[in-house]
Image: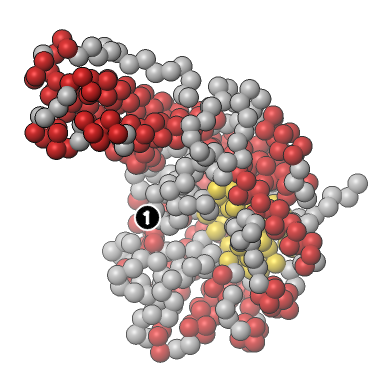
Amino acid sequence: MEEKLEFGANRLVHLDLKRAPLKVDFMEKIFPFFREWGATGLLIEWEDTFPYSDSLECIGSLNVESKAYSVADIERILKLAENSNLSVIPLVQTFGHLEFVLRHEEWKQLREVWKYTNALCPSNPKSLSLVTSMIDQVISKMPKDLQYFHIGADEVWQLGSCSFCSSQDKHVVLLEHLVSVLKHFKENYPHIRPIMWDDMIRGVPASLIQAHSLSELVDIMVWFYEPAPFFNIPIDLWNKYATIFKKVWIASAYKGATGACQILPVIQHHVSNHEQWLAFIKSSRAEIKGIAITGWSRYDHFATLCELLPSALPCLAICLSICKENEYTEEIFKKVATSLGYDQVPLLTNPYPRPQAVAPDLNYPGWKITTGVEWLANLKGKHMAIISSDQVGAWMNSWQLSTGFINPMQIQGIVSTLFNIGEEWEALETYMRDHMSEAYYQPQIEEWIATHCKPLKGKAKELYKSGHDLISAQLGTESLQMPTQFFPTPRPI
Ligand SMILES: [Zn+2]
């Protein structure tokens, strides 16, 4: 039976590696799952994890602490993708989101606005050679039969802002830079078809796009990550694309699209996004080349980590199943959830509110990281409930602690509870240090712990110490019957 291809022939998993490289050993574990779940390829956004050399050395992995990746790592990643029958499309930003380049002293002269690291000034004669050097270096390490190359080009926040660019029409500035970059492909890599994000040309008149022959040079990838009822692609826009480009790529999301501080994927959001895409494709009879299921690691190079990739694998598996089956049903959800080990504890389509039961044993790479993040979500809730409780507010507030005006009977219990919370934070930190290392390098582990554990652990311990010291001073240490050792629950609940 012929496979239905509502989403096109390509189902790509987006690996956003910006300041979040995955260990190559972990890729070895997950690539076969991607294929099994329905992926046909990978859209790999290397950002600062690629071993750029020569004049570009400072922007890549040869200059970052994790040293991810070496040239040998890149070769191994590509081999692993090939072994799992996954095609590879590299993504290199060429206009906006160049924070990882423009933050460096060596390249700050090319900023569109001197204060901001986002966008490149296309009028600077050195800009094009920077971009083409990046493209050349990445292509030189890719498979010889590389078919596609994604040039990014989304969210050029400061487009047309410098004194030179602002004297021209912004749309023309945009298109001329794109055409320069795309001609580099046409002249040097005629066998590679470039792809770009569509958002910057949404407002550009069709006649101008056509006048620059964009459709001859590039495919567009139309991205919308919203669920119902917010999923709304203007029909005028779609018709414009249909007129100019014969076929388009589309992009959905499985993580990193529901909040810059999100820690657990909201599966129902992403399922709805895919259902909306499916309905839209069917109703518009659009011709789709393929879909990239994006999984953003951060909102930009400087932002905090969103959902860790392992914790979003169940969501990815479901999204891929929808793309493969061209429908979403409860049976599909149950089948995927069961295959991942969610039988005793259900896989939640919305991880909130907390607390929620945490599955004791699952069946996919990195699931212990998911368990740890679930534990974090529960512990955060418990912590906040105590810190903002009436008991703390009425008997242990900062005035009472600073003056020593306390009622020991009231705060004895809180102090004991705070001790336990502090120790549970300690246990979570140890647990994540042990298990995050399966997928991540040390800098990302340290960043995650410093972001999510240390501040609240510090707060709990500080409050505990203040209460403990006051009671000890007034009543003696024997009045505090503290547990001498904290026993973390066998399963984080
Ligand atoms: Zn400029």
**Foreground of the two, 150 or 333:** 333
Seen in the picture, residue 215 relative to 390 is either above or below; the reply is: below
**Foreground of the two, 186 or 206:** 206
Quadrant of residue 338 within the rendered picture: top right
Identified at 34% across, 41% down, the residue is 451
Is residue 133 found left or right of 228 in the rendered image? Answer: left
Quadrant of residue 60 within the rendered picture: bottom left
Quadrant of residue 404 within the rendered picture: top left
Is residue 307 found left or right of 329 in the rendered image? Answer: left
Q: Residues within 10 Å of mark 1 (few under 14, many from 20)?
A: few
**Foreground of the two, 461 or 208:** 461
User: Tag 1, which secondary structure?
Assistant: loop
Is residue 275 found left or right of 98 in the rendered image? Answer: right
Residue 85 visible to an observer of this rendering? no
- Residue 326: percent from the left, percent from the top? 78, 50
- Residue 417: percent from the left, percent from the top? 30, 23
Q: How many marks?
A: 1
Identified at 9% across, 19% down, the residue is 474
Residue 384 visible to an observer of this rendering? yes
Residue lying furthest right: 1
Amino acid beneath label 1: Phe
Is residue 250 found left or right of 307 in the rendered image? Answer: right
Q: Is mark 1 within 8 Å of ligand 1?
A: no
Per the image, the residue denoted by label 1 is 302
- Residue 82: percent from the left, percent from the top? 66, 44
Identified at 33% across, 62% down, the residue is 103
Seen in the picture, residue 140 relative to 412 is either above or below; the reply is: below
Seen in the picture, residue 396 relative to 204 is either above or below; the reply is: above
Residue lying furthest top: 478
- Residue 376: percent from the left, percent from the top? 43, 33
